[in-house]
Every structure is written in C-alpha cells, then in structure tokens.
Image (cartoon, rainbow, N blue to C red):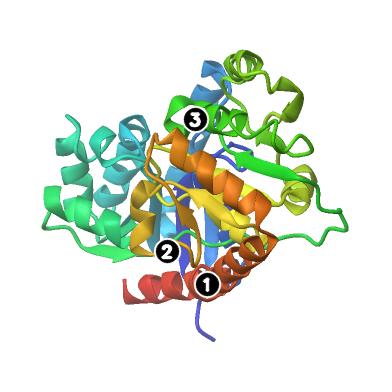
Amino acid sequence: MIKKKTILMVGPGHKTRGGITAVISAYQNSNLWGDFIIKWIDTYNDKNILTKIAHFFSGSVSFIYNLPKANIIHIHLSEPVSSLRKLFFFLIAKLFFKPVIVHLHSFDIKTSVGSKFLPLYRFLFSKADKVIVLSPFWEKEVKAYIPNCQIEVIFNPCPIILKSDCRKEKIILYAGTLNERKGFSLLIESFSQIGKKYPDWKLVFAGNGEIERATKLADQFNILNQIEFMGWVSGEKKNEIFSKSIIFCLPSYAEGFPMAILDAFSYRLPVISTKCGGIDMVLKHKEHVLFFEMGNALELTKLLDELISNEELRNTIGNNGFQFSKHNFGIDVIVSKLITLYKSI
C-alpha cells in the first residue's frame, strides 16, 4: 500500500472572509483531501488585532509541530502584509529542506510584485520549488519582474453550488467588499441612469465594507429604494441570493482572478465585468461575459440596459459562462492539475 503524502496548506482561517479561504474550502470539498493527508494551517483571521495575533501564534505552533512529517508545504499569499507574514513559514520550511509551493493571490501587480516589496517577492519566488499564479496574465506580469521563478498557471476553482428552489427576482447582484478598488460607486452611478426606466429592478450588494458611504451615494442618486445592502453573506444565505439574481456585475479596478465571477458562472448568471486581472485573456467578450472599460460609467449603463431588456442575451451569456467554467474551472479539472503538480514535486 502506497503511503499518502502529507501537505501543509498554509493560509487564512476557515471562517475568514475572502477569496483565498474560498479556494482552500473548495479544495477541501474535493478528492484532493482524500488523495493526500492535508493539514490546513490557519495563520490569519480578519477580526481584531488580538485575534489576528492569536491565529498567527497558534498557526505557527501547529506548523512547526506538523512540519517534520510533511512532504510539501503549500503557502497561499497575496499582498505584502500577507507575504511578510508567510515569510516566517517559508523560512522554517526551507530550514528543514521541505519543498515549497508559493500560491499568489494578489489583486494588483503594482501593489505587490511590482511595488517596493519586489525584493521580498523575488526571494520567495526564486527560492520556491514552484510558484502558482491564477492566469496567463499573472504569469506574464510576474515573469517580467522575476524571470527565474518556476511558474505554473492554475485557475481558481468554481465552487460546487447547493440546489435551491428560490424563484428568480429582478436583481443585479454585486458580491464582494464594498471599496473603491471593487468599483461599487461606479455601479450605483451607472444604475441610477436607468433606475427609473426599470423601477421593478434593484441592485443587491452582498458584502461588507463602506456600506454607509454607499447608502449616502444611493440617496444622492435617488435610487435608495432600489438598493439593498445585505452585508457579508456565506453558506445558505449566499446560495439564496445568487439563486434569486438574474444579472451579476463586477465593476472592479483590480483583481487576481475573481472568485465572484466563478460563483456567478456556477449559477448561470450573465456577467458584466471589467477586464481586471487579465481575465480577458481567458474569457471572451459577448460570449462568456460582457466587458466594459474600467471606470466607464456610461459603458456600464449601456450594458446593464442591454441585459435587462434582452432575456435571450442573458440566457446565452449565462449558459456559455456556465459551460466554459465547467470545462476550465471545474473543481475536478483544477484539482487534477494540482495533484499532478504535487506528484511532480
């Protein structure tokens, strides 16, 4: 009988909000957890400072305890603060001569690899046995700064959705943190131009962040009665709102490879998005998604109007996105590539 290899998966905690947790959770619900002995090392929580310190300390203890029997160390990191935090685990792993995979989830090359922290990323990436990036765009960008690293492109996986009997409602859904990087204010401005034309449609924001500011902005544009702020959603509540929605919009200025779009694909929602994170190198305009230029409120308004008024187009884009994601971002497809990578190391 072949002994299973042990992987230490270093990342944020199980209940932490964000894309990295969503990715690792998807792995956890796949056959990856059965083919290998995987220990999720919880090093971060997005609550108060004391909780963050406690998670880092407990994660460090767990990591050191499990390190001697580990065969591979898989470290998830993103922006400089995250990468500095993971440097500790990287150095300890190398001290024990363990193979290390570094998995980059940054949302902007300029704030991470292309920033003043380039020496940190250069050290991590050049010393790692393999670097995973989320798309061909990120492969190109990282290699421009660190040409000597060993890069593998592995997309984020589409989540497995729960069945729901929810009836569709005339909802345009935004899912993610409400901040300027995500472009929530642009979406409110754009929808305000057609809100009176479609009084039975509404915008739903599923996410935490600058809700008070967004509320004031919606009030200024006189569409507050057509907007709902749900706060952060997960589990059945997330499943319900995605199931009820008809259109999904991501007006973001910077992303790694947005999990929110993969969520939308899973529910056959037609997607309107910017070309953030180089997703236009993978997805095609008017086939899998409708693209608009970052910050262009007029263009976004036209696309919203077009999808609201054209059910046939909504169905075509939604079904195309679902089928494409099934064959390219399906959990089995992604996990198969990850297993191949683990075995090669």
Mark 2 vs mark 3: in front:
3
Residue 312 visible in the snapshot:
yes
Q: Secondary structure at mark 3?
A: helix
SS for callout 2: loop
Q: Are the residues tagged 2 and 1 within 8 Å (C-beta)?
A: yes
Question: Image height check: is 322 above or below 61?
Answer: below
Q: Residue at x 65, y 17 (%)?
A: 215
**Corner quadrant of residue 123:** top left
Marks 2 and 1, the one that precedes in the sequence: 2
Identify the residue at horizontal 42%, vertical 65% (top origin).
Answer: 284
Residue type pointed to by label 1: Phe
Q: Quadrant of the C terminus?
A: bottom left
Q: What crowding class fits label 3: few (fewer than 14 Cα within 10 Å), some (14-19), or many (20 or more)?
A: many
Looking at this view, is 317 or 260 the one in front? 317
Residue position marked by numbered label 2 in the rendering? 283
Image quadrant where residue 161 sits: bottom right
Residue on which the image places disc 1: 324
Task: Assign a secondary structure to mark 1.
Answer: helix
The residue that mark 3 highlights is: 186
Q: Reading the chain from its start, which is encountered first: label 2 or label 3?
A: 3
Q: Are marks 2 and 3 in contact (CB under 8 Å)?
A: no
**First-in-chain label (1 vs 3):** 3
Q: CA distance from mark 1 to mark 3?
A: 28 Å
Say what amino acid the circle numbered 2 marks: Leu
Nearest-to-viewer mark from 1 and 3: 3
Identified by mark 3, the residue type is Leu
Check disc 1: other Cα within 10 Å, few if <14, some if 14-19, many if 20+.
some
User: Residue 294 at what x, y percent from top left?
Assistant: 38, 39
